[in-house]
Structure formats: C-alpha cells, structure tokens
C-alpha cells in the first residue's frame, strides 16, 4: 500500500512537470489545453500561427470551438490571420 502511495506521488509530479507551458504566449486569451497544443507544435508567436490554416489548428488535440473563437478575435485585434 505504501509503495502505491509513493508511486502515485512520483507519477503526479512527473505529469505536472510535463504539462507546464513554458512561455506566456496567449496567456489569458485561450485555455491551457489549447496553449499546450500550440506549444507542442512549436507555435509561440502570431507570426508562426499565421503559417497554419484554421483547419490545421482545429485538428490539434486540445483545441475546440471556444478556443478557436477566442483565438480568431485576438488575431483580428492584432491584424493577423490564418493562411488560406
């Protein structure tokens, strides 16, 4: 029983470390799952984001309609758009 508790604590700390988003790109704009999805694809700027289509971003695990709507509003405010 004690070994299971120790193992659970170790695994939870590993999971917490591996899911931390390093930068603050889009912090406060979209939720963490969507931010992690972008980080996994090495998208850390609006310039890099503009190299992708809306459909490509929607295919990322962690991205949904809500995140996409918020992202499109933010991009429009910053005069950036997805590729066609």
Image: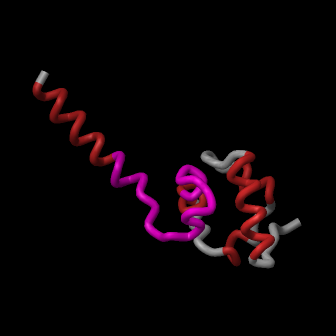
Tell whether position 20 is magenta: yes
The residue under the point 80% across, 78% down is 79
Q: Position of residue 36 (x, y in %)?
A: 53, 56
The residue stretch that appears in magenta: 15-35
Q: Where, quadrant-wise, is the C terminus in this rendering?
A: bottom right
The residue under the point 62% across, 62% down is 29
The residue under the point 73% across, 54% down is 68
53 relative to 28 in the view: left or right: right
Residue farthest along the top direction in this orientation: 1
The residue under the point 22% across, 42% down is 10
Q: Quadrant of residue 9?
A: top left
Q: Is residue 21 above or below residue 18?
A: below
Q: Position of residue 49 (x, y in %)?
A: 70, 69
11 relative to 64 in the view: left or right: left
Tell whether position 23 is magenta: yes
Q: Quadrant of residue 50?
A: bottom right
Q: Where, quadrant-wise, is the N terminus in this rendering?
A: top left
Q: Quadrant of residue 12?
A: top left
């Amino acid at each position: 029983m004690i070994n299971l508790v120790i193992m659970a604590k170790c695994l939870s700390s590993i999971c917490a470390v591996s899911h931390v988003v390093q930068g603050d790109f889009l912090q406060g704009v979209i939720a963490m799952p969507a931010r992690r999805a972008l980080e996994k694809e090495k998208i850390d700027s609006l310039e890099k984001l503009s190299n992708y289509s809306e459909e490509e971003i929607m295919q990322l695990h962690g991205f949904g309609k809500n995140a996409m709507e918020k992202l499109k509003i933010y991009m429009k405010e910053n005069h950036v758009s997805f590729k066609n």
